Amino acid sequence: MYITNFVTCKLQLISTKFMFGGCSSASLGFVIMIMSLRCWVKMMKRKNFIQNGGKQLQEFMRSKGYDHALPKIFTSSELKVATNNYADDMKIGTGGFGVVYKGKLKTGKLVAIKKELVPKDGGNKEFLNEVMILTQIHHKHIVKLLGCCLETKTPLLVYEYASNGTLADHLQETANSGYVMGWEQRLNVAIQTAEALSYLHRAASPPILHRDIKSANILLDDHCDAKVGDFGVSRLVPDGEKHISTVVQGTLGYLDPEYFQTLQLTDKSDVYSLGVMLVELITSLKPVDAHHRDPEFSNLALLFIHHIKEGALVEIIDPRFLETIDESVAMSHEQTWRIRSSILAVASLAYRCLSLVGHDRPSMMEVEHELHDISRKLHATRFEVAEESVALL
């Protein structure tokens, strides 16, 4: 392929020499230099396209009958313009993966563009994995992949834009400022996340295990509705299989201990990670914090389980939930009681999600149904507290 491109460029240069034969050597040299540069850029883009898995992606799309469907293949120049050449003021997120930029396409549509900081060995495997998974699933609470760019040294992914950032952003803001993300809003995010994961586990064919559920991978749109994102390490479950034997991947603080010990990934591994996220929603605490907590309980799951067993959960519930509905309206006793009861019910569910034995955890569908039931009771005219919730106090 590179030889073909080289020959094509060489022929273009010979043609250029012929056309400009009457020009001065300086003029001809300048024209040849420009033509050579263009050929080199074109060859590098083609090389990057192949190294980033462009051929594999095209074959996959054709095999699925997606010739005219998403993802769109963006050019590098399109995305440079969209991000103002990846200007610092367009950055909306950073992490070990690289940087996410806000972009504006020619159509005026806002997008999020994920760009790795540096290329890594086998990095295109995660990229291809995410593209192939996201082109097969469609759910209102799963982030939509709009396209990708394969011309650059590392591939770029283009997603729908979530204007309210990530759930982690909001929880950190809650911890570091006077802003409080309300309990009802948090419960809605939990429900929507469980709905998306239940869809992946039960409705997708083949089933999909996310493998990296965490608050930083839950995006919030204009209405603060949840969108599950980042499918780079997700896995498809082969027909008839209950688990996947694989090396451990995920995020510290969210990892299923059973998966860590056995190297067997199951749907209950996602349930465990969601359980940690539920505890984050209840407490506004980080999943891992060695600086502000006793080293024994730097892991939030361990801290939570300890307080449950000691009957002291109320000590780590974010107390601001019970102060006001908004900045100006004090809660009535009934409203405070209902929210308190709802928090305790979610805590009871989270406790079961965090069981060390995967078999003892609820399925994601059961988690979804239970969260819906908790929400229904929260908005009912009367809310009766279950004995198991009272026992948590």
Image (cartoon, rainbow, N blue to C red):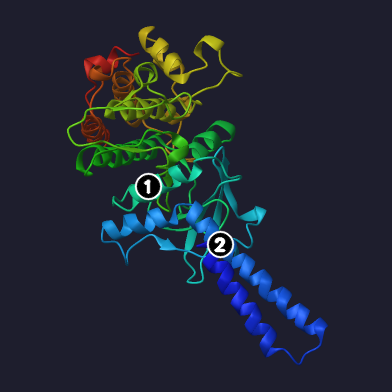
In the displayed structure, does residue 279 sit left or right of residue 197? right
- Label 1 or label 2, whichever lies nearer to me, is 2
Compared to residue 132, the image places residue 290 above or below, namely: above
Residue drawn 56% across and 41% down?
A: 120
Determine whether the residue tagged by mark 1 lies in a helix, strand or loop: loop
Characterize the local packing of mark 1: few (<14), some (14-19) or many (20 or more) Cα atoms within 10 angstroms. many
Q: Visible in this render: residue 145? A: no
Within 10 Å of disc 2 (Cα), the crowding (few <14, some 14-19, many 20+) is: some
Q: Is residue 294 left or right of residue 245?
A: right
User: Which residue is labeled 1 in the image?
Assistant: 225
Q: Position of residue 223 (x, y in %)?
A: 40, 51
User: Outermost residue toward the top?
Assistant: 310
Specify which label sits upstream in the sequence, 1 or 2. Answer: 2
Q: Is residue 375 visible?
A: yes
Location of mark 2 (residue): 45
- Cα distance in 3D space between marks 1 and 2: 38 Å
Foreground of the two, 143 or 57: 57
